Image: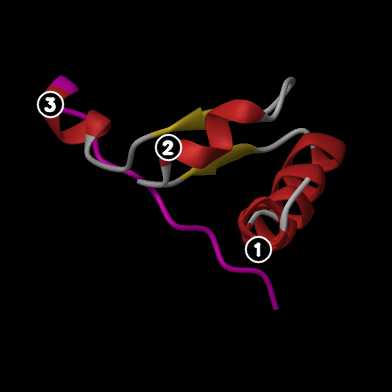
């Protein structure tokens, strides 16, 4: 592995962290970033997919 490969892998570290959180909590990850497709077990979708289907996304906040 050369230095350029290492830099590319380092950019995926935050994505791997967020993917692991979503997988472990059983949640769906909503993102426009196609790099998340590389994480097996991650349920993901594009945020504009709901508009195309006529659905709206409900945002739930917790205290």
In 3D space, how far apart are the residues under numbered discs 1 and 2 (Cα atoms)?
18 Å
Q: Earlier in the sequence, mark 2 or mark 3?
A: 2
Front-most of residues 15 and 10:
10
Q: Are marks 1 and 2 in contact (CB under 8 Å)?
A: no
Quarter holding the C terminus is: bottom right
Q: Earlier in the sequence, mark 3 or mark 1?
A: 1
Q: Secondary structure at mark 1?
A: helix
Instruction: First in sequence, mark 1 or 2: give its number.
Output: 1
User: Tag 3's secondary structure?
Assistant: helix
Q: Residues within 10 Å of mark 2 (few under 14, many from 20)?
A: few
Quadrant of the image occupied by residue 24: top right
How many labels sit on residues?
3
Contact? badges 3 and 1 (CB < 8 Å): no
Front label number (1 vs 2): 1
Mark 3 → mark 1, Cα distance in angstroms: 36 Å
Name the residue beneath numbered marker 2.
34
Is disc 2 placed on a helix, strand or loop?
helix
Q: Depth check: 6 or 38 in front? A: 6
**Residue 31 screen position, x and y as percent:** 43, 47
* Direction front: furthest residue: 2
Q: Which residue is mark 1?
A: 7
Q: Which mark is residue 52?
A: 3
- Magenta stretch: includes residue 44: no
Q: Which residues are magenta?
A: 53-63
Residue 22 on image: x %, y % = 73, 43
């Amino acid at each position: 592995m050369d230095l350029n490969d290492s830099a590319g892998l380092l950019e995926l570290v935050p994505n791997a962290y967020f993917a692991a959180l979503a997988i472990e909590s059983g949640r769906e990850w909503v993102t426009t970033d196609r790099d998340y497709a590389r994480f097996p077990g991650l349920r993901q979708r594009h945020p504009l997919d709901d508009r195309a289907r006529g659905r709206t996304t409900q945002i739930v906040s917790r205290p």
